[in-house]
Amino acid sequence: MSTVKLYIKDFFRYRYLLYNLISRDFKLKYRRSVLGVAWSVLNPLLMCGVMVVVFGNLFQFRGEGITNYPVYLVIGQLMFTFFRESTTMAMGSVMANAMLLRKVYIPKYVFPLEKTCFGLVNYFFSFIALIIIMLLTRSPLHATVLLAVYPILTMFLFSLGVGLVLSTMAVFFRDVIHLWEVFTTVLMYFSAIFYDPAQFGNVYLETLIKFNPIYWYITAFRTAVLDGQLLTLNMVVICGACSLAMLTFGLLVFKKNQDKFVLYM
């Protein structure tokens, strides 16, 4: 508990630094881009179009269509992209600021936190793509859409915990950067982004997929936005428990090793 209080205290002390770092990254990402921030919307729209053509036809061939497949697909795509981008950026954040950390005192966890927050900002801009697709497909807007805040918040905390662990490991083992890229590619196919696990008719494979926390965040979001239903108890408990457990683990790992970073950077 004392560790959490310390982090919260530092967070308020350096909140302006956090804001400036997020603003800097946002400007750098879209610098010299003609369309600028519009790419946050266009990219998921274009990717969704390609995946609908490829996977949509595949599912139709199998005779197992999904209700409003474009919306189903873009929700999974946006949620997983947020997780992958935020954790990947957080992983190299401490190493990227090695020179700054050697000169002045800054809480090292600020950098993984900033990258995760930056990923969340990008996600909210990309959310416009979901609204556009819902309008084009005439998907009804349910009152339960407000419940989508829960999977977004818990996934943010989960991603932050993973980012803290990865940023720690990357300082000592550079190979983690390459391994994580491979792992997230594999994880994407086990997150039910472009398919419904029930379609396989394989209980063991369906159970394996449900061991993936990302699956629960995506499913909870779809339940609230696409299906217009309340989140089930399993969704609430699993999403919340995974995020708190991962965040706690990430904070402990980061705190235990942060004093040794300077020796390896």
Image (cartoon, rainbow, N blue to C red):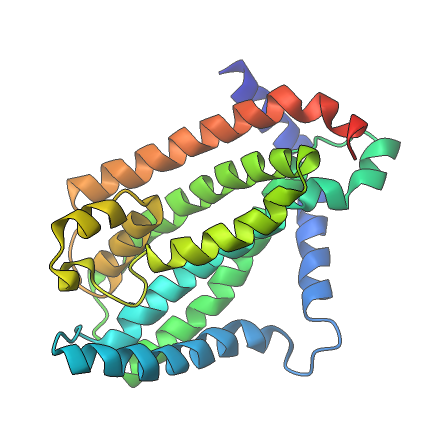
Rendered location of residue 14, percent (x, y):
69, 35
For residue 61, which quarter of the picture?
bottom left
- In this picture, residue 28 sits left or right of residue 143: right
Q: Residue at x 16, y 47 (%)?
A: 204
Vertically, is 34 above or below 220? below
- In this picture, residue 198 sits left or right of residue 162: left
- In this picture, residue 189 sits left or right of residue 185: left
Rendered location of residue 24, percent (x, y):
73, 57
Q: Residue at x 27, y 38 (%)?
A: 238
Residue 24 visible within the image: yes
Rendered location of residue 106, percent (x, y):
76, 32
Vertically, is 85 above or below 49? above
**Front residue of this view, candidates 55 and 112:** 55
**Front residue of this view, candidates 2 and 98:** 98
Q: Residue at x 12, y 50 (%)?
A: 203
For residue 122, which quarter of the picture?
bottom right
Q: Residue at x 63, y 33 (%)?
A: 168
Rendered location of residue 6, percent (x, y):
60, 21
Q: Residue furthest right?
A: 103
Residue 138 visible within the image: no
